[in-house]
Amino acid sequence: PKPVLLVSQCLLGDPVRYDGAHKQHPAIAQHLLPHITTAALCPEVAAGMGVPRPAIRRQQMGDSEIIALASSGAALANSLLSTSQRLATHATTQTAVAAILKARSPSCGIESSPLFNPDGTILALGDGLFVQQLRKHQTHLLLVSEEQLHDAESCVYFVRLCQLALALKLNLL
Ligand code: SF4
C-alpha cells in the first residue's frame, strides 16, 4: 500500500485560503502525490470559517494564546481550537505516517507561525494551532513543511522516509 499523508488542502490547488486563493505546490504535485495516498484537510474551512474569510493571527493575551483578527487584533470567537483537536484525533489522522503543511499559517505552520503581541509586533515563531494539536495527539507523525520539499530530490527522499515509516507501522521490517 501507499503511505497515507495529511496535506494542507491549499497546497493541492484547492482555493481554500482566507483570500480565496490556493498555494499549489508544483514539486509536491509532480514528485510526491503519485506515490502517496493523500488525506487533504483545511482546519479553518473545517471550523466553518468560510472562503473567503478574514485573515487571522495567533496572538498572546496575558498567559494564553488566542486567535484574533489580523486587521485589528480583536479576539475572534471561533471553533478553530476544538476543530483542530477533532481533526488531530480523527481516524484518518491515525492511519497517516506524515503531514505536509503550509508554512507560516496560523493553523498549519510548523515552527514558522508568527505569534503576535496585541500591538501587532511579532513575539515569536512557533506552531500553528492545528500543528500544536498534532504534536499533542499524534506523536508518531513526521511533520514536514512544504518549504522543505522544494525539488525532486527532497520529495523522493521524503517518499522513501514515508515508505519506511509505513513498513515500520505494519511491522514489515
Ligand atoms: Fe491552507 Fe492550512 Fe490555511 Fe487551510 S488553514 S488555507 S490548509 S494553510
Image (spheres, rainbow, N blue to C red):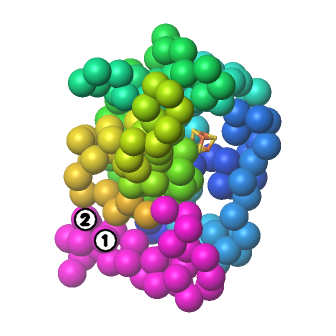
Q: Which mark is residue 88?
A: none
Lateral position of residue 28 relative to residue 63, left or right: right
Q: Amino acid at mark 1?
A: Ala
Residue 70 in sight? yes
Residue 38 x/y as whole percent:
56, 56
- The residue beneath circle 2 is 169
The answer to whether residue 66 is above or below residue 166 is above
Q: Main secondary structure of the magenta part?
A: helix
**Which residue is pictured at 66% across the width and 55% down the height?**
11
Q: SS for tag 2?
A: helix
Tag on residue 165? 1
Question: Is residue 93 in sight in this rendering?
Answer: no
Q: Position of residue 119 (x, y in %)?
A: 50, 28
Q: Are marks 2 and 1 in contact (CB under 8 Å)?
A: yes
Residue drawn at (38%, 47%), measured in percent from left and top?
A: 124
Number of numbered discs: 2
Whether residue 34 sits left or right of residue 133 in the image: it is right
Residue in the foreground of this view, choosing between 89 and 76:
76
Camera-side mark, 2 or 1: 1
27 part of magenta stretch: no
Q: Which residues are magenta?
A: 145-173
